[in-house]
Amino acid sequence: MMTRKLLTTTLCIGMAAVSAFQQSSFSSSAAAQSSSSRLSIGKVFGGDNTTKEQQLPKDVKDAISKCRGAVQKALENRLSRMDVEMPVGANFGVEKKKASSSRKRSSLASLTDGGDSSMEGGEEGLTMEKLDTSNRELARLFVEMFQPLGGQHISAVFNDEILADEARKLWSGDLSVECNIVAIDRKGKRSRGGLMGGKKKKKKAKGFASKMAEELEDDGSSGPFNLPKDTEVALFVAPGPKELIAIERICNEVGMGTCVILLNARLSRVEKYASDDARKLFESFEPVWFLGAASQEKSPGCLMHRAYPGKWVLARKPKIGAPKTIAIQDDMFTGDECAEAYATMEVSEIEKTSEKLAMNVAEWFK
């Protein structure tokens, strides 16, 4: 059951959206309604949150707006364990607003520029820097969303001190992103491999028992990771298998009264958990927002989407135009379900002609 503290979070997030997202997603009429309808969660965001059909976001701003709405609906329904997943390396443009000020709108395709290679991402390809930037930008958007709670009640949790320090440097002095910026691994060690020009040291493979022991060990100064005192919303940024061990412990310690949100944890790709209890815990996290590539081996050029409390959508991205829905169901699509939907979809002659023309034009400029 939602505690008084989390209920406060639910009410405040609507207020946060007015200030943090009004330029990207609010209509003026919806913003005007917020002050007079604060106790009506649906109206805070404009409208009653009901849609006749699940729609994919049409651009970056729309994706952010819809994601925010899904989180708000989850809080309204008293969920305090959420999973949010954006495309790998998604380009939100948060840290490059001045450079891109001439572009009034960003297309949905720009979310995956330089991102998911399986969806034929950007020309420059994915790098560690782009991946870190994408995850940090998403964290920043969520910190802004919850800002009315007060920075002391929001914790942005990065995997290591290198990532945390970068966020501190970039967010320093910005009142819109006040929060606790902390790291699970406070030793500051991070292997970047060839991406950063260094030689990657070979490490002995560790099992989950070893990872747990390492996470719990006391180094004499800091001890195991804990959330800052008075944290009401914990945003874990792109946690991996090792970090999930720490998150499991934190969830058990803080209880359901603290809202825990996983950002780009990629839980669907985790093959093995430390224990059955850990699996049950992370399977209980509600996928309130998912936008990413479907199995490209089974369904080339397709993506999956889900916005809480809606259904899962499998859509095909043609060479020209917006994604077209080819299947809808209650649960996340498996590879086989993607293949079945892809095999039975219908492509109009107009689409075939347009895509053929697009490929021919692309050939001219090679």
Image (cartoon, rainbow, N blue to C red):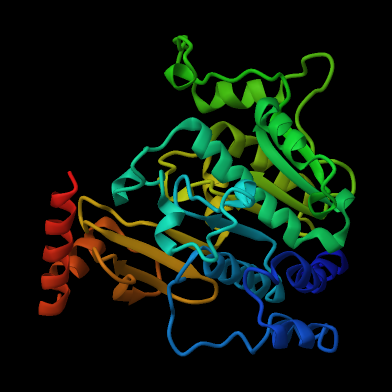
Which residue lies at the image location 73% right of the left edge and 24% below the top edge?
186
On the image, which quarter does residue 219 sit in?
top right
Q: Position of residue 131 (x, y in %)?
A: 50, 38
Nearer to us in this view, 36 or 280: 36
Which residue lies at the image location 30% right of the left edge and 59% below the top edge?
334
10 shown above or below 132: below
Q: Position of residue 291 (x, y in %)?
A: 45, 60
Q: Is residue 77 visible?
A: yes
**224 with respect to 285 (left or right):** right
76 shown above or below 260: below
Q: Position of residue 318 (x, y in %)?
A: 24, 66
Which residue lies at the image location 56% right of the left edge and 66% below the top edge?
61
Which residue lies at the image location 52% right of the left edge and 47% below the top edge?
279
**153 with respect to 267 (left or right):** right
The N terminus appears in which quarter of the rendering? bottom right
Nearer to us in this view, 346 or 360: 360
Q: Position of residue 237 (x, y in %)?
A: 62, 43
Q: Is residue 274 visible?
A: no
**173 with respect to 243 (left or right):** right
Total marks shown come to: 0
On the image, which quarter does residue 243 sit in?
top right
The C terminus appears in which quarter of the rendering? top left
322 shown above or below 204: below
